[in-house]
């Protein structure tokens, strides 16, 4: 998530009220909104088509689940940090040149997917795609802001841009089944190639409003950024793959984590002593900004209930994207509704109210999901997942508006630091949420499996009868009663594992509900305390004066 026009902030002379920019013509506004939706869709497919179809891609590439997850890690590793440097590159070399070169590179990389035939080549292409996709979200953001006059950029522009970003996972899951049927891996990415070429034409035919160029790059940026990129990349690999290779079983995970810490420490040692740092660590460590970062991080963690929770539950039950199409439509509609609500109501005074409503929706939705059974189907989660999606669409625009407003008070030079903070809490925060959610589910599944299995013994008439019934289903192909009983025992063990996973997901849903509820309580207490201080401060001053 990159760039909010810093150039516009630099154009005004100090101490003079800048002349308000004229509102763009209606045809340009509509064209810019359509271009932004196209760019966000193109970028979102590149990120989510693999995540939405991991199990299907396994067969296409002849890989195991753990090996296929390297595709996600390879894409995320460079994508998590590259926008930090792209902000300065864009400001120094101009928006037009930045847009044309970046979209051309993205289209060229999209074509490389046609030449993938095995896992190593797929991983290499996904790594390059992660690099090429970083500017696309920036362009999608800028086109949406360009569609609105200055007074509405931080309300409608910001909200709609973030809504497009939040909607892309649901769209990817909605359109994946027919693409998989067309041609597996290549079927998925034929559409992305077409969208990339359309985006290339749009960027050339509909240029963004130019902003003044400023010389902002320094040679130390090219020393600091590789260290930051390595740090974020290694951390992304650890978070993406840790729960699949298991945290304490693969020594290379520890090596990657140590390398990430060392690289960031070296970058911090350089940045802390610079007059114009790439990232302002002193500012990022202030209590106000740390509080903002924690709020964003908690939000990403609770939203993992939707991105990793409900979808993971249905996959364990045996449902694929084809059986959940209506649920994804509900999630998409609720996300858009949340974004539109935010756009219509957003101002700096309502940030706390919007956040409270969003957290309340997520708390209630996650609590409803915590009562799932093996009979739960997507139709049973329309209300709960709709509430969570609505809360997600409602939460992020006010948070970014509040953070960006605080950043602009410090000056345009702090924008890169704000973008790094936002990226870390969204990209890496999303990975942290998924990794924590998946790890918690795995641990609770082992606990529940142990509880269930210790009560299963063939000495029990009920268990023995159940094994016999399950084995009888194979009576026409297995005439040996011993083999039938063995098959019945295997089927019973599968059912026990499925039930253990359902209980584990229920525990995770309940935990997410508790976290969101505590965040809501903390927000309410903070707002009440702030109001009380404002009320008591005049009385205290009057008492001192007397």
Image (spheres, rainbow, N blue to C red):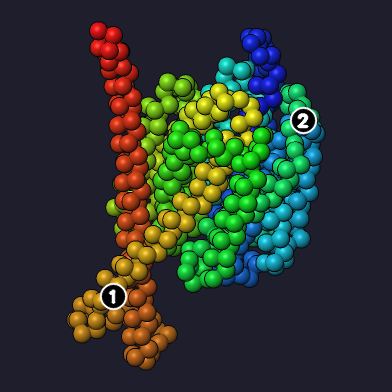
Distance of label 1 from label 2 (alpha carbons): 67 Å
Mark 2 secondary-structure assignment: loop
Q: Residue at x 56, y 56 (%)?
A: 261
**x and y percentages locating residue 206 in the rendered image:** 76, 28
Q: Is residue 373 left or right of residue 21?
A: left
Q: Nearer the viewer, mark 1 or mark 2?
A: 2
Checking the image for residue 489, the label placed there is none
Image check: 77 left or right of 475?
right
- Asked whether, in this view, residue 264 is left or right of residue 532, the answer is right
User: Which residue lies at the image location 46% right of the left edge and 38% below the top edge?
Assistant: 290
Instruction: Quadrant for residue 294, please give it.
Output: top left
Query: Where does residue 341 sit, x and y in percent of width and height?
Result: 45, 27
In this view, 267 is above or below 312: above
**Rendered location of residue 60, percent (x, y):** 64, 66
- N-terminal of the pair, mark 1 or mark 2, is 2
Disc 1: which residue: 453
Mark 1 lies on a secondary structure that is helix
The residue lying at 41 percent from left, 57 percent from top is: 313
- Mark 2 highlights which residue? 215
Label total for image: 2
């Amino acid at each position: 998530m990159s760039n909010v026009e810093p150039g516009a902030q630099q154009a005004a002379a100090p101490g003079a009220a800048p002349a308000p920019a004229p509102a763009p013509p209606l045809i340009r506004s509509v064209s810019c909104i359509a271009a932004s939706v196209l760019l966000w869709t193109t970028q979102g497919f590149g990120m989510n088509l693999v995540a939405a179809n991991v199990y299907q891609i396994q067969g296409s590439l002849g890989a195991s689940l753990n090996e296929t997850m390297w595709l996600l890690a390879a894409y995320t590793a460079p994508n998590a940090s590259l926008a930090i440097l792209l902000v300065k590159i864009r400001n120094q070399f101009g928006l037009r040149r930045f847009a044309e070169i970046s979209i051309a590179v993205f289209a060229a990389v999209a074509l490389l997917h046609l030449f993938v035939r095995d896992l190593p080549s797929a991983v290499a292409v996904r790594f390059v795609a992660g690099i090429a996709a970083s500017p696309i979200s920036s362009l999608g953001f800028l086109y949406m802001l360009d569609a609105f006059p200055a007074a509405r950029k931080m309300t409608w522009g910001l909200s709609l841009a973030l809504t497009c970003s939040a909607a892309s996972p649901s769209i990817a899951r909605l359109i994946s089944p027919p693409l998989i049927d067309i041609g597996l891996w290549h079927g998925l990415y034929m559409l992305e190639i077409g969208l990339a070429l359309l985006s290339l034409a749009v960027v050339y035919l509909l240029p963004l409003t130019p902003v003044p160029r400023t010389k902002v790059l320094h040679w130390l940026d090219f020393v600091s950024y590789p260290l930051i990129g390595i740090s974020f990349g290694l951390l992304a690999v650890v978070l993406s793959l840790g729960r699949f290779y298991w945290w304490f079983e693969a020594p290379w995970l520890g090596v990657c984590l140590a390398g990430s810490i060392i690289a960031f420490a070296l970058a911090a040692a350089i940045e802390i002593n610079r007059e114009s740092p790439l990232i302002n660590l002193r500012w990022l460590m202030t209590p106000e900004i740390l509080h903002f970062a924690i709020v964003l991080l908690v939000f990403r963690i609770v939203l993992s209930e939707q991105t990793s929770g409900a979808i993971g539950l249905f996959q364990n039950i045996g449902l694929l994207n084809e059986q959940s199409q209506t649920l994804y439509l509900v999630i998409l509609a609720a996300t858009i509704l949340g974004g539109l609500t935010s756009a219509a109501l957003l101002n700096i005074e309502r940030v706390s109210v919007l956040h409270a409503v969003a957290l309340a929706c997520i708390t209630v939705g996650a609590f409803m999901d915590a009562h799932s059974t093996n009979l739960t189907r997507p139709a049973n989660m329309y209300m709960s997942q709709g509430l969570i999606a609505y809360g997600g669409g409602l939460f992020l625009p006010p948070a970014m508006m509040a953070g960006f407003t605080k950043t602009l008070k410090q000056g345009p030079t702090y924008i890169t630091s704000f973008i790094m903070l936002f990226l870390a809490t969204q990209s890496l925060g999303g990975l942290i949420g998924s990794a924590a959610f998946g790890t918690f589910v795995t641990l609770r599944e082992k606990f529940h499996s142990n509880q269930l299995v210790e009560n299963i013994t063939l000495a029990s008439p009920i268990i023995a009868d159940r094994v016999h019934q399950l084995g009888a289903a194979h009576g026409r192909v297995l005439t040996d009663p011993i083999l039938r009983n063995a098959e019945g025992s295997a089927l019973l063990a599968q059912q026990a594992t499925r039930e253990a996973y359902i209980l584990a997901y229920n525990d995770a849903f309940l935990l997410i509900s508790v976290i969101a509820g505590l965040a809501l309580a903390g927000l309410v207490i903070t707002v009440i305390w702030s109001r009380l201080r404002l009320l008591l401060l005049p009385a205290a001053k009057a008492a001192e004066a007397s």
